[in-house]
Amino acid sequence: MDGDELTEQETALYDRQIRVWGANAQRRLTKSHILVSGIKGTVAEFCKNIVLAGVGSVTLMDDSLVSEEALNANFVIPPDENAYRGKTVAEMCCDSLKDFNPMVLVSVEKGDLSTLGTDYFEKFDVVVIGYGSLATKKSVNEKCRKLSKRVAFYTVDCRDSCGEIFVDLQNYKYTKKKLEETVECELNYPSFQEAISVPWKPIPRRTAKLYFAMRVIEVFEESERRKHGECSLLDLATVLEIKRKLCEANSVSESHIPDSLLERLITGNTEFPPACAIVGGILAQEVIKAVSGKGDPLKNFFYFDAQDGKGVMEDISNSFAS
């Protein structure tokens, strides 16, 4: 991402943020290439934020056709049926995002993310998967890890008024200010597969209940071959049985995961726009930090629940089991 200096036009457009994080950080942003898959409300907020921040390019993948349901939280799609009829979510979002910042190259990639080969991801600096299946998140994360360059990998999921972000920056080095000096720091991240495979028993009891609840929902959707959000109250008995089996296998009490939380996650198929804005904003902030190399990055999960208004970071790794 290192290379040419900022142009006069870029310097003028991004003047305010250059004053915040410096010209070098902005230069890295303008040379970065971001791949985004799955564009509902939270991811739309994320895309808006990184386009305004001035990344180099954003490639969108979402072949689903625009429907009334898609308009509920995705504010970048104009609510005009004549405009969106027959078009995909990615196409409509692309048109709108270009208007936010004409200096950012926004494009659409058709196809299924899970079928793309490892080499495809080589041209990106960041990969973000929104609302992906368990298999897709595992597969794409492993492909990114096989590349010779470091590709920052993120997943994001919002259900009802709850949100989850996962981050894998692999072996990540960055700088931060400490008193009057700049210090270099290094963090090692587990893969998505490693992070969700940590035994539950050693994990501190205070850990966000959403971490465990989201794992139950992932297993349910995979075992029942459901797409994201294809569940209802009729599925609660099956979800609770999966919870029972997972808690038993991990030797923890079923109280680890409140039934009421699982019920919210399977019945709240419509995203809560204020939660989208918060989680999408946090995700954009983290991507900007990872690309610019400035500031402490999130490691490695973030959870938000609008019911209590709290956002928490959870570091889930095999260190618990050692």
Image (cartoon, helix red, strand yellow):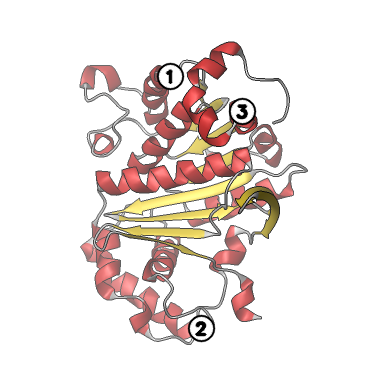
Tell me the residue that label 3 is attached to: 23
Residue 129 placement (x, y as % from top left): 50, 45
Image quarter for residue 241?
Answer: bottom left
Q: Residues within 10 Å of mark 2 (few under 14, many from 20)?
A: some
Tell me the residue that label 1 is attached to: 98
Q: Residue at x 49, y 30 (%)?
A: 17
Q: Secondary structure under badge 2?
A: loop
Q: CA distance from mark 2 to mark 1?
A: 47 Å
Q: Residue at x 35, y 58 (%)?
A: 304
Image quarter where the N terminus lies is top right
Going from the N terminus, do you reach mark 3 or mark 1 first? 3
Q: Residue furthest front?
A: 180
Residue 41 placement (x, y as % from top left): 33, 40
Going from the N terminus, do you reach mark 2 or mark 1 first? 1
Quick one: 248 or 42, which is closer to the camera? 42
Task: Give the residue type that dot 3 points to.
Answer: Ala
Position of residue 117 in the picture relative to residue 230 (left or right): right
Q: Secondary structure under badge 1?
A: helix
Task: Give the residue type that dot 1 points to.
Answer: Lys
Q: CA distance from mark 3 to mark 1?
A: 23 Å
Residue 36 placement (x, y as % from top left): 50, 37
Q: Nearer the viewer's eye, disc 3 or disc 1? A: 3
Image quarter for residue 46?
Answer: top left
Q: CA distance from mark 3 to mark 2?
A: 46 Å
Is any part of residue 63 visible from this angle? no
Q: Secondary structure under badge 3?
A: helix
Above or below, 223 against 228 in this view is below
Tell me the residue that label 2 is attached to: 201
Q: Answer whether labels 3 and 1 touch (C-beta < 8 Å).
A: no
Q: Nearer the viewer's eye, disc 3 or disc 2? A: 3
Task: Give the residue type that dot 2 points to.
Answer: Lys
Q: Residue at x 28, y 60 (%)?
A: 266
